């Protein structure tokens, strides 16, 4: 897949592409619908299909780095887009220059001069340009003036927890903030995952019979602190596990959240490895136990519950 950052001319292989435009954080069901429509339009026109996205997240640009609980940081977002089968991803830096472009200038400078698109597909709530003045209706009119096709995808609704719910990134973030990884997966169309390097911890888990792979997530991660059934992927192999995300109140309560995963049926050294931890099910909230013995007893119960969920 072609990945191009801030191209000044259409990237080789993406000339005349149909582009799906958006932030695409989480690459959820709504995003997938936009991309599927772009792929269909590209097929009709016998041209490539690309995604046009922006980094950093616009909210982080305006409010400061780390404001948004990112569901998929840039590298993970590109990987998820790749899995959907697009031909390429164009990443435009969201900075003061881009933020200051009027909607018409965005069309002229980005879509026509720099990408030479033959079509553009957006979601019903997509806005662009200075002060978000560019709407799907504006883009449709601009496409008619400039000779490129425009398609607007309507709201996507998912059955999340027994009730229909509009799919959007904020809804998935809220679900994760509540620890409801099942609802988040229903909204996103895939289970939420985090990627990071395994770092050294205090090694207390090893002393308690639960050696863990420790990963520090971004400070902006607002996943609810607690115990989860997870899958951990390393070097192309996936293992089941049980993970704690939080501050470890029984033993340290340092105030620095850490993701600690006890990996089932694994022996080896993971330090320095990049791992992907996928959150499958919620077990319980993080709590402070009166003793290490009480903690170990609960950890054994957590392990059994995680195995049952993963089965």
Image: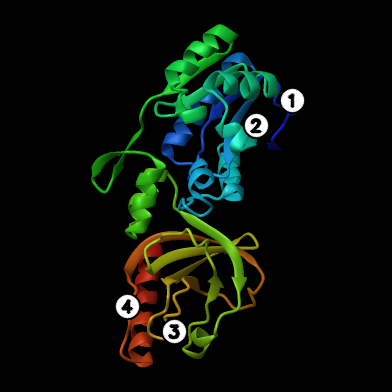
Q: Is residue 33 left or right of residue 271?
A: left
Which residue is identified by label 2? Answer: 87
The Cα atoms of the two marked residues, 1 and 3, are separated by: 53 Å
Marker disc for residue 266? none
Mark nearer the viewer, 4 or 2: 4
Residue 287 shows up from this direction? yes
Mark nearer the viewer, 4 or 3: 3
Which residue is identified by label 4? Answer: 287
The Cα atoms of the two marked residues, 1 and 4, are separated by: 55 Å
Task: Give the answer, above or below, for where 56 lies relative to 201.
Answer: above
Q: Secondary structure at mark 4?
A: loop
Q: Is residue 61 left or right of residue 226?
A: right
Q: Secondary structure at mark 3?
A: loop
> Which is nearer the N-term, disc 4 or disc 3?
3
Which residue is identified by label 3? Answer: 252
The Cα atoms of the two marked residues, 2 and 3, are separated by: 48 Å
Which residue is identified by label 1? Answer: 9
**Circle 1: is it few (<14), some (14-19), or many (20+) Cα within 10 Å?**
few
Q: Where is residue 12 drawn, in percent x and y?
A: 76, 27
């Amino acid at each position: 897949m072609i990945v191009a950052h801030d191209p000044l001319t259409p990237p080789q292989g993406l000339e005349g592409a149909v582009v799906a435009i958006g932030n695409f954080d989480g690459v959820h069901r709504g995003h997938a619908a936009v991309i599927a429509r772009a792929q269909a339009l590209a097929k009709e026109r016998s041209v490539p299909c690309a995604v046009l996205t922006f980094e950093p997240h616009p909210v982080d640009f305006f409010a400061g780095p780390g404001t948004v609980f990112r569901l998929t940081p840039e590298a993970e977002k590109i990987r998820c887009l790749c899995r959907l089968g697009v031909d390429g991803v164009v990443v435009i830096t969201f900075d003061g220059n881009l933020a200051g472009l009027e909607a018409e200038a965005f069309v002229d400078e980005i879509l026509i001069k720099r990408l030479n698109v033959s079509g553009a597909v957006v979601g019903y709530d997509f806005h662009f340009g200075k002060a978000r003045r560019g709407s799907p209706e504006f883009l449709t009119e601009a496409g008619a003036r400039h000779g490129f096709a425009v398609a607007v995808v309507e709201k996507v609704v998912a059955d999340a927890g027994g009730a229909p719910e509009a799919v959007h990134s904020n809804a998935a973030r809220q679900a994760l903030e509540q620890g409801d990884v099942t609802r988040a997966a229903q909204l996103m169309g895939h289970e939420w995952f985090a990627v990071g390097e395994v770092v050294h911890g205090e090694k207390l888990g090893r002393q308690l019979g639960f050696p863990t792979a420790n990963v520090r997530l971004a400070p902006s991660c607002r996943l609810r602190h607690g115990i989860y059934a997870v899958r951990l992927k390393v070097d192309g192999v996936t293992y089941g596990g049980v993970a704690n995300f939080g501050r470890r109140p029984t033993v340290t309560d340092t105030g620095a959240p850490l993701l600690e995963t006890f990996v089932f049926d694994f022996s080896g050294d993971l330090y320095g490895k990049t791992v992907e931890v996928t959150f499958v099910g919620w077990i319980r909230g993080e709590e402070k136990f009166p003793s290490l013995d009480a903690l170990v007893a609960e950890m054994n119960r957590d392990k059994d519950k995680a195995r049952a969920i993963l089965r």
